Image: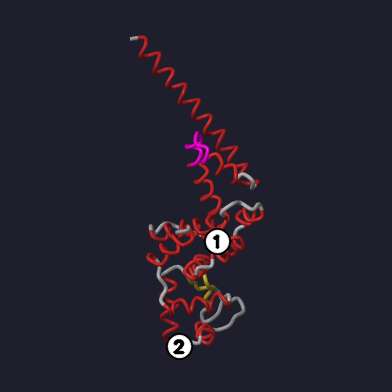
Amino acid sequence: MSIEDNIRTIFLHSLPLTPIENKVLEALISMKSGTAYSIWKASGLKHYPTVLRTVKKLKNKRCVEEITDRMGGRGRLYTPTLFGELTYFILKGEPAQVTRTIALSSPRFQEMVNSKVQGIDEWAHYIARYMLLRIERKEPLNLHDFDDFVKEHVSTYIGEKLFDIDERRARNEILELTKVEWIRDFTIEETEREIQRSRKYIEELGKFKEKLMSK
C-alpha cells in the first residue's frame, strides 16, 4: 500500500464524510464561498434543511468555516477550510490535487514542488496527516499561518533525521530536501546547533571520566 493510500485509509477511519457531506463540500469547494441557500442550489440536494444541518456538521469537523460577508449581503457566508479541501481530495483519491492545494497555500511548499523534491505527493499527504493529528488532539491549528505550519512539520522531520545522521538513508533524505533553499538554510543552522550540543556532551563526558579516574 502506498503512503497516499495508507493516509487515505486513516482519513476514512478518523474523519469519514457521508455522501451528503461530500456533496455539500464538493459544491462549496467549486463555489469558493456561498450562503447555505446557494450551496443548496449548487449541490443539487432536494431539501434545504438537509444542507443547513450538513454545513453545521462540516463546521464541527473543521472542514467549513463561516466568514464575514464583505459585500453587505444578507445571510451567513461559508467557505471550505484548507483542511476541508485536503480531506475532500484525499478521500477522493487525488494525490496531485492534494499537492496542488497545499502549494497554493504555502510558498515554502511551492518551493519544494519547484525544486522537484522526490515524493512530493507523499509530503503533501504527511502534512495533511499532521493537521489531522493536531485536530484529533484538540491542539491549536491556525491555518492562516499555514506557511509556518509547513515549515514546522519539515523542520521537525529534519531534526529527527539528524539524530540518525550516521545512517546513509537519513543523510540521503536530508540531502534531497536541501535542494530547497529555505530547508538548506535551516538544516545548516540545525546541524551547527547539534554540533555545539555534541561538543558540550563530549566535554561533560570528559569531565566525568576524569572524576572516575581520580578515585
The residue depicted at 52 percent of the width and 56 percent of the height is 122
Q: Which residue is mark 2?
A: 48
As for residue 201 lying within the magenta part, the answer is: no
Comparing labels 2 and 1, the label whose residue is closer to the camera:
2
The residue depicted at 50 percent of the width and 56 percent of the height is 127
The residue depicted at 51 percent of the width and 66 percent of the height is 86
| Front-lying residue, 27 or 98 | 98
Q: Residue furthest front?
A: 1
Tell me the quadrant of the picture where the N terminus can be found. bottom left
Looking at the image, residue 178 sits to the left or right of residue 11; the answer is: right
Which three-letter amino acid code belongs to the residue tagged 2?
Tyr
Query: How is the structure coloured here?
Result: secondary structure
Query: In the structure shown, which secondary structural element does the residue marked by tag 1 occupy?
Result: helix
| Numbered circle sitting on residue 87 | none
Q: Pointer 2 and pointer 1: residues touching (CB < 8 Å)?
A: no
Q: Residue furthest left?
A: 215
Which three-letter amino acid code belongs to the residue tagged 1?
His
| Front-lying residue, 188 or 137 | 188
Looking at the image, residue 164 sits to the left or right of residue 182; the answer is: left
Q: Quadrant of residue 215?
A: top left
Residue 93: x and y, percent? 50, 68
Q: Earlier in the sequence, mark 2 or mark 1?
A: 2
As for residue 169 lying within the magenta part, the answer is: yes
**Above or below, comparing residue 4 to residue 185 in the picture:** below
Q: Which residue is mark 1?
A: 144
Q: CA distance from mark 2 to mark 1?
A: 31 Å
The magenta region covers 161-170
Residue 73: x and y, percent? 58, 83
**Above or below, comparing residue 37 to residue 82 in the picture:** below
Number of residues whose C-alpha sits closer than 10 Å to that of mark 2, classed few (under 14), some (14–19) or many (20 or more): some
Q: Residue furthest top?
A: 214
